[in-house]
Amino acid sequence: MNSSALILMISVQLVVTILTGWFFYKVLVTKPKAEPDSYSENDDVER
């Protein structure tokens, strides 16, 4: 394997690893959206 192919392989692996880590971080840190209770909204019985 020549040096240019090795440099390209390492750089692509680094970019993919960094992007994967960034998206995992975003998923773990982002707060969930406040959603209404769909069970009470779909209830047929009036209270």
Image (tube, helix red, strand yellow):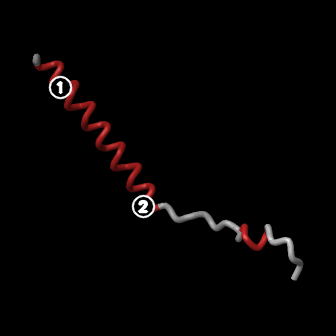
> How many other residues sit within 10 Å of disc 2, few (<14), some (14-19) or many (≥20)?
few
Residue marked by disc 1: 7
Dot 2 falls on a residue whose secondary structure is helix
Point out the image quarter for the C terminus. bottom right
Q: Is residue 35 left or right of residue 1?
A: right
Query: Relative to residue 22, is residue 41 drawn left or right?
Result: right
Above or below: residue 35 compared with residue 13: below
- Would residue 36 appear left or right of 20 to someone viewing this image? right
Q: Nearer the viewer, residue 11 or 32?
A: 32
The residue under the point 55% across, 64% down is 32
> Disc 1 residue type?
Ile
Identify the amino acid type marked 2.
Answer: Leu
Lateral position of residue 35 relative to residue 42, left or right = left
Q: Position of residue 10 (x, y in %)?
A: 20, 31
Residue under label 2, please give it: 28
Q: Earlier in the sequence, mark 1 or mark 2?
A: 1
Rendered image quadrant of residue 45: bottom right
Percent of width and height locating residue 1: 10, 18
- At horizontal 45% and vertical 56% (from top left) the residue drawn is 27
